Image (spheres, rainbow, N blue to C red):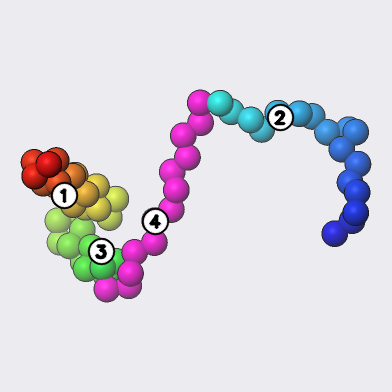
């Protein structure tokens, strides 16, 4: 890397978007991913739908025992 970079022609905030919501990737263990993929295929839905449903049910269960 250079010790110094010339940013004199740069534009501050060019890509800044204050209201952007990022969807971060979540990496599942191989056995879990395989199970969810098979289950989604059986139900004819996408993997995201299955994962969201599982998480939603767990969230409801955890909220109920608080």
Mark 1 touches mark 4? (CB < 8 Å): no
Instruction: Work out whether mark 2 precedes mark 4 in sequence or the reverse, and give the earlier one.
Output: 2
Extent of the magenta region? 19-31
Marks 3 and 2, Cα distance to the nearest angstrom? 39 Å
Give the x, y percent position of residue 24.
Answer: 44, 48
Mark drawn on residue 37: 3
Q: CA distance from mark 2 to mark 4?
A: 28 Å
Which label lies toward us, 1 or 4? Answer: 1
Can residue 4 be seen in the rendering of this structure?
yes
Crowding near the residue tagged with mark 2, few <14, some 14–19, many ≥20 C-alpha atoms within 10 Å: few
Compared with 8, 55 (above or below) is below
Q: Are marks 3 and 2 in contact (CB under 8 Å)?
A: no
Q: CA distance from mark 3 to mark 1?
A: 19 Å
Q: Is residue 20 magenta?
A: yes
Residue on which the image places disc 4: 26
Q: Depth check: give the residue in front, 40 or 25.
A: 25
């Amino acid at each position: 890397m250079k010790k110094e970079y010339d940013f004199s022609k740069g534009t501050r905030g060019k890509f800044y978007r204050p209201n952007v919501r990022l969807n971060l990737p979540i990496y599942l263990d191989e056995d879990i991913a395989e199970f969810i993929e098979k289950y989604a295929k059986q139900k004819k839905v996408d993997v995201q739908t299955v994962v969201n449903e599982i998480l939603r049910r767990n969230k409801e269960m955890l909220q109920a025992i608080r």
